[in-house]
Amino acid sequence: ETGVTQSPTHLIKTRGQQVTLRCSSQSGHNTVSWYQQALGQGPQFIFQYYREEENGRGNFPPRFSGLQFPNYSSELNVNALELDDSALYLCASSLVGGGPQETQYFGPGTRLLVL
Amino acid sequence: AQSVTQPDIHITVSEGASLELRCNYSYGATPYLFWYVQSPGQGLQLLLKYFSGDTLVQGIKGFEAEFKRSQSSFNLRKPSVHWSDAAEYFCAVGSNSGGGADGLTFGKGTHLIIQP
């Protein structure tokens, strides 16, 4: 059984650019959630995808968008990057709809630096 | 809205000593509570979770946590720490407002330092 994988591991972008981060969910999991973890903070929920549809969203602007594919892998896209977008981006997968009781299994994250 | 408070930013414990990490939550209904650990440069690993039933929950790596509804607390404990326990520990609460997934709400974390 493979765990959650994310790519790339590190990324450097400049302000105003766009970035795409990728996530492959754990085998058998059909729900993917994305979190942003700023330095010294706990992760913050960005959004969740289930059956290729956005299933819930945290307090993030529309320039944060996502996709989920039929194989349950997912992308996080961020447009018009700002300096404050510098963070560790974590992907988590869970079973069947990802309700609050479902355990979320986290990937190692993608470290994004915006200059 | 739900929230999680971890009052201790840093805790230093001697190897072999006992450990307690504090977590207080705010949530209107029965909470779904989790403790995760994050080693440097790593993602989050689940230590244990509580949904209902026995208020003392056993987890991996010798950790346990006790849910106390009257105190809105879910403190993490370990009787004897090892140097490999040095990491960042996060308490989290899961919720669902009914309008879709709300994800996990995390505390700011407690950085555990182990003294030899």
Image (cartoon, coloured by chain):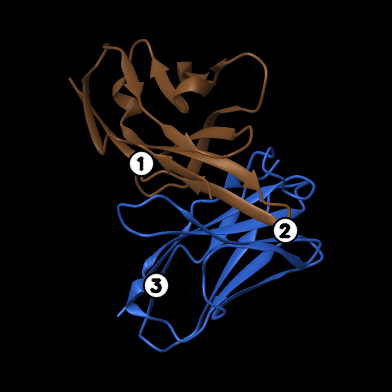
Q: CA distance from mark 3 to mark 1?
A: 20 Å
Q: Which mark is residue B99?
A: 2
Which class describes the residues within 10 Å of circle 2: few (<14), some (14-19), or many (20+)?
Answer: few
Residue A35 placement (x, y as % from top left)? 52, 58
Instruction: Describe residue B74's horizontal placement relative to residue B20 as left or right.
Output: right
Q: Chain of mark 3?
A: A
For the residues beneath circles 1 and 2, the answer to whether they share a chain is yes
What hue represents chain B? Answer: brown
For the point 37% across and 10% down, the residue is: B79
* Badge 3 vs badge 1, beta-carbon distance below 8 Å: no
User: In this picture, is B44 found above or below B47?
Assistant: below
Q: Residue shown at 57%/79% (left/top)? A: A62
In the image as oriented, which residue stretches furthest toward the left? Answer: B116
1 or 2: mark nearer the eye? 2
Residue at 30% x, 31% y: name it: B86
Q: Are marks 1 and 2 in contact (CB under 8 Å)?
A: no
Q: Chain of mark 2?
A: B
Residue B31 sits in quarter: top right
Q: Are marks 2 and 3 in contact (CB under 8 Å)?
A: no
What kind of residue is marked 3?
Asp
Residue B81: x %, y % from top left: 32, 17
> Which colour represents chain A?
blue
Left or right position of B80 against A17: left
Question: What residue does disc 3 label?
Answer: A85
Is B109 on the left-hand or right-hand side of A71?
A: left
Which residue: 44% across, 23% down?
A: B71
Residue B32 visible to the viewer: yes
Q: Does label 1 lie on the same chain as label 3?
A: no
Name the residue carrying label 1. Answer: B109
Residue A115 appears in which quarter of the rendering? Answer: bottom left
Q: Can residue A3 be seen from the camera position used here?
A: no
